[in-house]
Image (cartoon, helix red, strand yellow):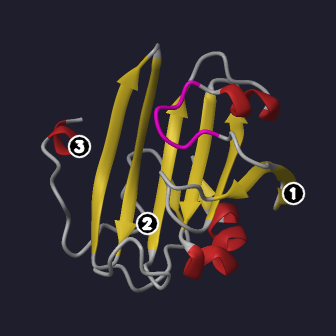
């Protein structure tokens, strides 16, 4: 929580164990920095890590990956994600449900607030949601990233 509120940046970024209690088995190469992101509001806690490169956010070659765990006691179905109490990264666009590994995952194109790419999320277990935002260059690797996330 302190790292997030201090807006500290890790250069170089942390690796597979960047998020406490979460193992990210596949972190693509090419990131130059990373940052812990924590937020508490409306009875939920969101925590995660954002990896990024040094390109401008509007550059379509910009590489960015944001993995977040949301502790939301009411979460139990994928449909609930469309009305989830997330500050950033809502599933308000044109969503599609796909199966990746053994997970049913809700996906949509990234919007203005999240940047270009693909946004995905699933209910890992009752009360625990995982979301992943991958910038356009990382979209082909998104299924591999999602399959490699372990809580």
Reply above or below: 70 against 94.
above
Q: Say which residue label 3 marks.
A: 4
Give the mark nearer the N terminus: 2 vs 1: 2
- Residue at (53%, 71%) from the top-left corner? 135
**Residue 108 quadrant:** bottom right
19 or 95: nearer the eye?
A: 95
Reply above or below: 137 against 1.
below
Which element carries disc 2, helix, strand or loop? loop
Reply above or below: 139 against 73.
below
In whole angstroms, how far apart are the C-alphas of marks 2 and 1? 23 Å
- In the picture, measured across the screen, residue 86 lies left or right of residue 7, that is right
Bin the neighbour count of mark 2 within 10 Å (Cα to Cα): few under 14, some 14-19, many 20 and up.
Answer: few
Q: Position of residue 120 (x, y in %)?
A: 67, 53
For marks 3 and 2, give the one nearer the viewer: 3
Q: Position of residue 64 (x, y in %)?
A: 44, 70
Q: Say which residue label 2 marks.
A: 16
- In the picture, measured across the screen, residue 125 lies left or right of residue 38, that is right
Which element carries disc 1, helix, strand or loop? strand
Identify the disc placed on residue 99: 1
In whole angstroms, how far apart are the C-alphas of marks 3 and 2? 18 Å
- Residue bounds of the magenta highlight: 85-90
Which element carries disc 3, helix, strand or loop? helix
**Residue 74 quadrant:** top right
């Amino acid at each position: 929580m302190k790292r997030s509120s201090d807006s500290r940046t890790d250069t170089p970024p942390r690796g597979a164990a960047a998020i406490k209690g979460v193992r990210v088995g596949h972190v693509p190469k090419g990131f130059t920095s990373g940052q812990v992101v924590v937020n508490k509001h409306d009875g939920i806690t969101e925590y995660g890590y954002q990896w990024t490169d040094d390109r401008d956010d509007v550059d379509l070659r910009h590489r960015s990956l944001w993995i977040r765990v949301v502790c939301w006691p009411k979460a139990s179905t994928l449909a609930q994600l469309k009305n989830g109490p997330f500050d950033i990264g809502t599933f308000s666009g044109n969503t599609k449900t796909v199966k990746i590994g053994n997970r049913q995952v809700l996906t949509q194109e990234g919007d203005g607030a999240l940047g270009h790419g693909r946004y995905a999320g699933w209910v890992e277990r009752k009360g625990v949601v995982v979301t992943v935002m991958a910038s356009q260059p990382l979209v082909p690797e998104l299924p591999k990233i999602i399959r490699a996330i372990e809580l």
